[in-house]
Amino acid sequence: MSRRTPPVAELVERARDGESRAVARLISLVEDESPLLREVMAALAPHAGRAHIVGITGSPGVGKSTSTSALVTAYRATGKRVGVLAVDPSSPFSGGALLGDRVRMQEHATDPGVFIRSMASRGHLGGLAWTTPQALRVLDAAGFDVVLVETVGVGQSEVEIAGMADTTLILLAPGMGDGIQAAKAGILEVGDIYVVNKADRDGVQNVTRDLRAMLALADREPDAWKPPILKTVASRNEGVDEVVEAIEQRLEWMRGSGVLEERRRSRARDEIEAIAMTALRSRFGHLHGDARLDVLAAKVAAGSTDPYSAADELISAL
Amino acid sequence: MSRRTPPVAELVERARDGESRAVARLISLVEDESPLLREVMAALAPHAGRAHIVGITGSPGVGKSTSTSALVTAYRATGKRVGVLAVDPSSPFSGGALLGDRVRMQEHATDPGVFIRSMASRGHLGGLAWTTPQALRVLDAAGFDVVLVETVGVGQSEVEIAGMADTTLILLAPGMGDGIQAAKAGILEVGDIYVVNKADRDGVQNVTRDLRAMLALADREPDAWKPPILKTVASRNEGVDEVVEAIEQRLEWMRGSGVLEERRRSRARDEIEAIAMTALRSRFGHLHGDARLDVLAAKVAAGSTDPYSAADELISAL
């Protein structure tokens, strides 16, 4: 069966009309690093900048998928259109993200006001940092009011996601050594809202107390956002409306304080830089049919020059 | 107390004489992204390219620290000098790597033939990809015969480490759902030697059987290296000599097949490119006192241009 891509303008129009297949096709173009991307992004540009991008992260087992699903339900009750992007940073090779634990999301599968997509960060051009912002741009321009970006908090992924979101939710759960996890992963510097899920379990008081103590130590400006700590039992939808409320309050605060505008500019900056760097890297590859970089690499490997001098030479050849 | 840095040439000479403090100082210059780095790398260049760089990775709890320590003991029994670099990819902010579980390494602390260093991948300039190769270059030039680079296998860190090592050991252990972990993290494409640690536990047969089945599915050239599967109880030093033997066999094979030379050139290529890209990125930042990128970012945020067109403009301003 042929997978002819319709003209970009038509795809964008259909995506904006709420057609899930068109949205999916645009995100596939991002994932495939299609040569059409440039045209896609130009067509999306006038429509972007409206969605509230909400990052959701936490250690494995805290209930991210359940919480995301519960948030979708709560948002749908208010009539808002919701996009969900589940990014799997542990799939550098596979190409397709694992959907095993996303079964819960199926309850939203037939709702036209919800779009759900899993994405592997294959990392050809820099992983999360390259594909995620462009996929978010698709969902934003397609007219979703809220876009939830969910990723497991391992390595630096939560820090990266926080850099791409307007608001970052950090999920924790009792009995997982979260205090140490939190301190270790630096999540205290990126969370805007803290949610202690599985709050019907033993140890919930310890988690909130530790979290409160650690947040109290953070060095914040007097007029900075004060991250609230909320409790949920997402599997029973308990406390989820309060999380939505906190997200909306955060959005109001960001609008009023200018932080929203500032964050979006800073993200655009990162995105432009990433695209420019990728373009330059591909030029390195093509310099003199690839030979110059190879010659320099052989010299460095042989010890007859060092990598800094080689880099100087490479740049001057641009 | 003043931390005056001795002249680079003197530091390099002392490091090559086996003085641990000089090696440590050179690695600190790497971690601190010192302006002296360029000079350091030039001084190291003629001495690099001799060490066997061995990556060690695996999920949390498989016994990486214990295994690394046992490998150091085994290598020391053969008279070889061993460097250990423990990279913690989960510490983007802290600056100092967590040393909590490194207590076992203490038994080597007084051995002048062993150098051990923990390093956080703070990620200012790209994390693992930036600091680790330069730290490895220091240890290599300082004359260690073997350099063990240990990192926890989360996110893409094991793939990154594999790209920096000559030989990559993947550690697994029974009872940790390793089959799924292996498939998910793509470690089957980067392992050169598989070690099932804690082989005195139940389930060791399942792990080796699953591993064997998965490796059999891999699409390898007929003359490619065939990754062995070994069993250890690192806490009792059982099976560790066999691992050392496999590592040495792998080195021989790489030398004979030309893979060693090829890998080292490819790494040098990556290193040159990373340094060149960093230099170019810093030029973007300084273009017209930063204003041009800010103006472009504001336009993208406002939807009046798209990131690709903005990137074009940025590059043409270089």
Image (tube, coloured by chain):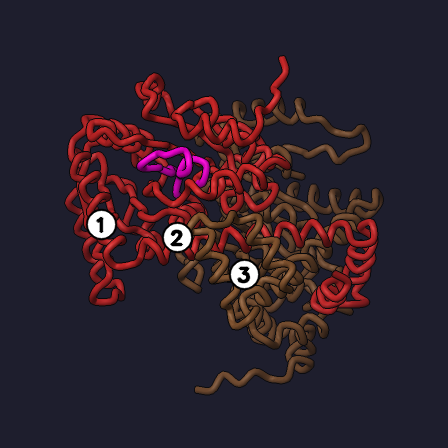
Chain colours: A brown, B red
Label 1 SS: helix
Give the distance between the C-alpha atoms of the residues marked 1 and 3, in whole angstroms: 33 Å
Q: Looking at the image, can residue A276 be seen?
A: yes
Of badges 2 and 3, the one in the foreground is: 2
Tags 2 and 3 in contact by the CB under 8 Å rule?
no
Q: Is residue A19 above or below residue B24?
A: below
Q: Are marks 2 and 1 on the same chain?
A: yes
Give the distance between the C-alpha atoms of the residues marked 2 and 1, in whole angstroms: 15 Å
Q: Determine which quarter of the picture holds residue A78.
A: bottom right
Q: Residue at x 51, y 62 (%)?
A: A293
Q: Looking at the image, can residue A103 be seen?
A: no
The magenta-colored residue range is: B137-153
Give the distance between the C-alpha atoms of the residues marked 2 and 3, in whole angstroms: 22 Å
Task: Please state which amino acid type lies under the numbered disc 1.
Answer: Glu
Pick whichever, A135 or B22, lies toward us: B22
Left/right of residue B95 with respect to residue A97 in the rendered view: right
Q: Residue at x 44, y 28 (%)?
A: B15
Left/right of residue A293 with respect to residue B141 in the rendered view: right
Q: Is B47 inside the magenta-drawn segment?
A: no
Q: Residue at x 56, y 32 (%)?
A: B29
- Please give the residue where the numbered disc 3 appears in the rendered image: A125
Q: Chain of mark 2?
A: B
Q: Is residue A60 above or below residue A109?
A: above
The percent position of residue B43, horizontal first and vertical second, equals 51, 38
The percent position of residue A67, horizontal first and vertical second, equals 54, 47
Label 2 SS: helix
Q: Chain of mark 3?
A: A
Residue B252 is tagged as 1
**Which quarter of the rendered picture does the C terminus of chain A lie within?**
bottom right
